[in-house]
Image (cartoon, rainbow, N blue to C red):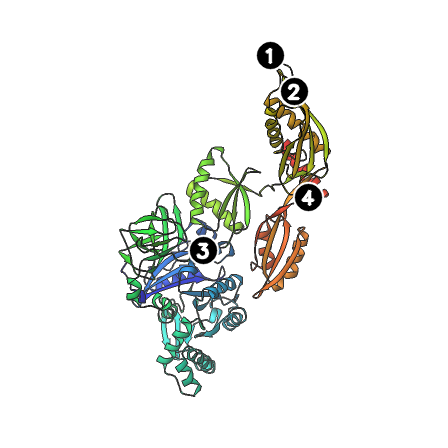
Amino acid sequence: MKVYPSSSIRNVAIAAHGGTGKTSLTEALLYNTGATKRLGRVDEGNTVTDYLPEEIKRKVTTNSSLAVAEWEDHKINLLDTPGYSDFFGDVVGALRVVDSLLVVVSAVAGVEVQTEVVWEEADKRQLSRIAYINKMDRENANFHKAVDSMREQLSGHIVPVQLPMGAAESFTGVIDILNLKAFTYDNGSEQEAPVPAEYADEVASLREALVEAAAEGDDELLMKYLDGEELSPTEIRAGLKKAVAAGKVIPVLCGSALKNMAVKPVLDYIVNYLPSPVDTAGKDAATLEQEKLAALVFKTIADPYVGKLSMFRVYSGVLKSDSTVYNVNRESEEKIGQLFSLQGKNQLPVTEMKPGDIGAIAKLQVTTTGDTLTSKAAPVRLEGIDFPEPTLPVAIKPKSKGDEDKLSNALARLLEEDPTLRLSKNTETRETILTGIGESHLDITLERLQRKFGVEVEMSTPTVPYRETIRAAVNHIEGKHKKQTGGHGQYGHVFIDMAPLPEQEFEFTESIFGGAVPRQYIPAVEKGIREAMQEGILAGYPVTNIKVNLADGSYHPVDSSEMAFKVAAGLAFRKAVEQAKPVLLEPIMNVEITVPEQFMGDIMGDLNSRRGRILGMEPQGKNQVIRAQVPLAEMYRYAINLKSITQARGHFKMDFAQYEEVPASIAEKIIQQTRTKKEA
């Protein structure tokens, strides 16, 4: 593939709610530019950007994929992104490196939840946008209703630049409002025609709105427009380009991606109205090329056969094949081999990449997602990527016992590939915890583990790391270990006092008088108690928040030993806990939930049902932030419930607050379940 200058590059993410036809539109755009020879279909599993087995099987995009199209001597880097909330991390990564966004809206359903979420993310990044109302050929398609839903639910000045002729079965083509031309489609072929008379009034009205929107993009044009002067088509185009680049106006096109109807105009709008990397940088191409190299890795693909593939965008300088760069995040040099443009899974070799271009490099040694590749002589560090935090944990273990090491290595590769996964080891429950965004995210992760690395995994709800403590003080509790064998016997004898210690996990003291327990055995007593604390008497959970004092004891000059005193201490400890009103403790989490205001009542009711305590709430834009404390046992599946209650509009984060006593009725069930499990 040839090397394109920065001014001739367009970086566009295609995003929206799942099922709107993003991948079908990507496929049609590639086909119309000649990048592909046939129009792939999602249902047939032969599209360029949905190439992973999991995507083909489910017929949904789970992974942002790069495809390159050449149109009117421009290079268009298209990033087809997932439309479901479980894979939003890939959308965030893509939006970090593009200059503009192509939002797809269904003519049948209008704006849906994930479209709103993506739009808000684009607002934060101040991205230029165009919209495409897809599925005009479907039953119940309604262009005007879809546009109205955009105006009601999305920010910005939504301006149709096309008008469909007919809908559903009668959809025959579109009217270009700016140029006052009609285009009809028959089996993919396009025919220009005059604007039908029945649309004349509506087209005139829409054109007036379009001219007004274009005038708002340029102060001189606005003055001219307000003075009643007519703007030329060239002036309208120039004003519209400025307004779109500034994010003031969002042009709306329409058609049917699946039937390849009215797709070429999208390419024209991308090239003519969306900004180039030069426009967004505010510097000319020559200046950008002369600056020091700065490229951001925004996605990593781990393949057990090909190795690691790192996708990046160049922001300044020129990145060349067979060169050496410096990873400023890892403070390490990296050897660059062959650079590629990507066509889905296919690699197109290039010699170099100018500022603004997006591509891939294979087999980087230390580089991961979010790292900056730069020059060691004058390093530049780009802003990283703020991926969403995962909140749905599961406990995992390999189905085959011999696969522990294999699982560990495979998970390390997947974590490198997916920044929205977290892996941790709970030392108390001895479980490996994998945390993801949602159920589908975790299911597909485990499918990839099996497909890529041959490791089958069992998944379960994590065990709550309960603890035990006491609520009363007890004194002079005896522990005696006496055993007589053929040679030396074993003799250890202690009396301990025990009391609650709310502010500390454990404190050990001694008040031995007259050498009742020799000094050399006192550390063994403490060790015996610490070991006994690992397994409480109620349900075998660790004991915490206690103070133990070694008060008295006795010894045998021959048979006493460290081991004997350690055993005696453990016996005394268990007796003391039994008499000191033992109780079960559970971890309580600080939870912060961000939801649209209309869901507040449902969220509060749900938190109450989870034994939650509401601490407060405050507005945040059009959302409300609720702060609460909730038992961890009630939060393991909360990510799924929150998605259901808020139609995937809410999100939350939590961290550990403290341990608190479990209510007696619930504690009884937990103790019974734990004992039954151990017996089994």
Q: Which residue is mark 4?
A: 662
> Which numbered disc flags the more N-terminal residue, 3 or 4?
3
> Which numbered disc flags the more N-terminal residue, 1 or 4?
1
Label 3 secondary element: helix
From the viewer's side, name the closer residue of 184 and 233.
Answer: 233
Instruction: Identify whether 264 is placed above or below 87.
Output: below
- Residue at x 38% of width, y 71% of height: 273
Rate crowding at label 4 as few (under 14), some (14 to 19) or many (20 or more) other CA atoms within 10 Å.
some
Instruction: Identify whether 435 is placed above or below 76.
Output: above
The answer to whether residue 680 shows anywhere in this view is: no
- Residue at x 67% of width, y 57% of height: 605
Q: Which residue is mark 1?
A: 487
> Which numbered disc flags the more N-terminal residue, 1 or 3?
3
Amino acid type at image mark 1: Gly
Amino acid type at image mark 2: Tyr
Q: Which residue is mark 3?
A: 90
The residues bearing labels 2 and 3 have C-alpha atoms spaced at a distance of: 67 Å
Q: Which quadrant does the C terminus fall into?
A: top right
